Image (spheres, rainbow, N blue to C red):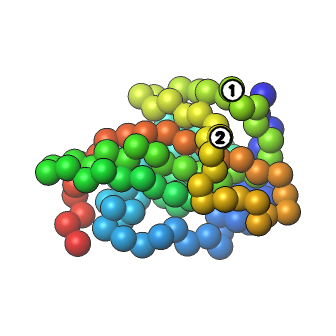
Amino acid sequence: MIKIDKEKNLLFYNTYVPYDCVNSRNFCSQIKSVCKELADVFEKHNIDIEKPWELSPVKLKNTTEYISCQYLVFGECSDDFKMKAGNVIVRKELGNYPSTKGFDQPNFVLDFAITLPNVIKK
């Protein structure tokens, strides 16, 4: 079960600025085109795929493994939620780091993993 509050997502993502570092810039510069199907799903629900809530990158020589790409979503979601969009499997994150408890509205975090080439050097 998933119930998404598109209006609250729109308000959040219109003002949210993700962390700015080389790994984040590398991710944000590619994710929309690499994960077109997921970007389309997120866009329908006013989730900006270029503004992750949290990233956990492991930088290798020519690629970066983003072992956790998290997005804050307003609404409700069952703990066993799982969906496939293109070549990406998205699940509800149960650990929620960083914490989302500071928000008054019901929310949850969606998470996926992906490996991307290192196109941004600095």
- The residue sitting at 49% across, 39% down in the picture is 112
Figure quadrant of the C terminus: bottom left
As measured in the structure, the alpha-carbon distance from the residue carrying label 1 to the one carrying label 2 is 9 Å
Residue 35 showing in the rendered view: no
Residue 46 image label: none
- The residue sitting at 56% across, 59% down in the picture is 53
Q: Position of residue 19 (x, y in %)?
A: 47, 70
Q: Earlier in the sequence, mark 1 or mark 2?
A: 1
Q: Which residue is mark 2?
A: 94
In the image, taking residue 64 as reference, residue 111 lies left or right, namely right
Residue 7 occupies quadrant: bottom right
Kind of residue at disc 2: Leu
Residue 64 showing in the rendered view: yes
Kind of residue at disc 1: Asp
Figure quadrant of the N terminus: top right
- The residue sitting at 54% across, 50% down in the picture is 70
Q: Residues within 10 Å of mark 1 (few under 14, many from 20)?
A: few
